[in-house]
Amino acid sequence: MNENEKKEFEQVVEAVTSKVAPIVTEKTVDMLVEKFKNEKPLRKQIFGDGESSEKSELAEKKAIAAEYIKKLVRKEETKSLSSGSATNGSELVPTYVSDSVIGVAQKYGLIRSKAMQWPMQGILEDVPTVGTVQAYRLATDTTAMTASQPTTGAVKLSAKTIGVMIPISKTLLMNANPKLVDILTVLAGKAIAKLEDQWGLLGLAAGEGIFQNTNVPVYTLGSTNTTYAKATATDLLAVEDLVDENFIGDSMEWVMSRSVLNNFRKERAVVGSDKQGFLLPGYGENTPPTLWGYPYNTTAVMPKNSDESQAGKKFLALVDWSNIVFGDAMQYTMEISDQATITDVDGSTAINTFQQNMVALKIWGQVDIKLANAASAFGVLATAAS
């Protein structure tokens, strides 16, 4: 560095330190970044007040993620996101994005937050499952004990690619900042959580999920009860009877949409002018939110009262979360293309990213969702066909 460059650099640093907006030239950017990393006062100004190392570290991760996105747009060399252990060059990988996507998905998704998590070491993996065993009482201390062999099996996980593609302005990404990173990770996390709940509960293909697994027992409402609103609280008892009592435990919950839950909220012990006697507690009451002793959870992916066709449809489930296996390869990758033509969420509108000066931002990973003990740990409620 010659004397003129050194003098220019010192002027820029002095201007930034005194909170004066400087004109930063290209040749001073790298030097300035290094100064930010080494100067404690400047780190406080950029990455927080310095009172919390966690806040400073989080802000720094956001800044790194924003720079990563800019590099993607400029097509510079980048690395895959990873939520696993650090590797060489991990400082270049925006772990904040992958961790945030996972965190958002866990917050909004039932499968992510409640199913049995199984980190996958490869594309294919077998998860062992075990049934129940029998205990015996001996007549005397010398009586031979009868052996009881548990039923064993395996859930075969096969990682499948899931992802979300977000069309976004190229100019906006080229000026990416931490706030934009947060917006993108929230959008991606919520979309992935919704897909996983559809997969694990409704099933995305034949044989998948609780609704499409043919081994899961189903209780059907009586004849002419062809809408979800016809279900009563006693029908839930019939669903409970479908579940093997050996599998009933703390991880069991009712799962339905909020509108279907409201059908049960409207039920009263005394029908007529009685304004009290609701079978479910009202807001603000201390009674635990349960249906026949089991907690309930709602999700927007489950069937709703507003559905046009309800006859012969499954719409509610009693779920043992410990018997839903969520396999996750724990790696999430971000890619950007400005050559793609993608279809908008309406299913028909085409977005030509090149013509519209946009890019398609893709975040994807590999997971699998399978049921264990499908015939014993779940029950489903369905409407009559006619």
Image (spheres, rainbow, N blue to C red):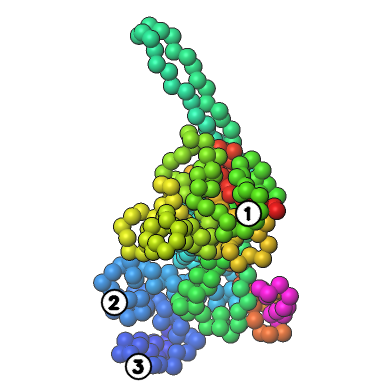
Crowding around mark 2 (Cα neighbors within 10 Å: few <14, some 14 to 19, many 20+) is few
What is the quadrant of the N terminus in the image? bottom left
- Residue 284 x/y as whole percent: 33, 64
Compared to residue 245, the image places residue 252 above or below, namely below
| Residue found at the very far front of the displayed protein | 273
Q: Which mark is residue 108?
A: none
Residue found 52% across the figure and 22% down from its top: 149
Of callouts 3 and 1, the N-terminal one: 3
Q: Earlier in the sequence, mark 2 or mark 1?
A: 2
Q: Is residue 42 left or right of residue 251?
A: left
The image quadrant that residue 53 belongs to is bottom left
Q: Which residues are magenta?
A: 344-354
Amino acid beneath label 3: Val
Q: Amino acid at mark 2?
A: Asp
Disc 3 is placed on an element classified as loop
Camera-side mark, 3 or 1: 1
Q: CA distance from mark 3 to mark 1?
A: 72 Å
Q: Which residue is mark 3?
A: 20
Image marks 3 and 1: residues in contact by CB distance under 8 Å: no
Q: Return the mark for residue 225.
A: 1
Residue beneath the point at 36% across and 68% down: 57
Spot occupied by residue 297 in the image (x, y as percentages of width and height): 47, 56
| Residue appearing at x 50%, y 86% in the figure | 26
The residue that label 2 is drawn on is 49
Q: From the image, state whether disc 3 or disc 2 is nearer to you.
A: 2
Q: Secondary structure at mark 1?
A: loop
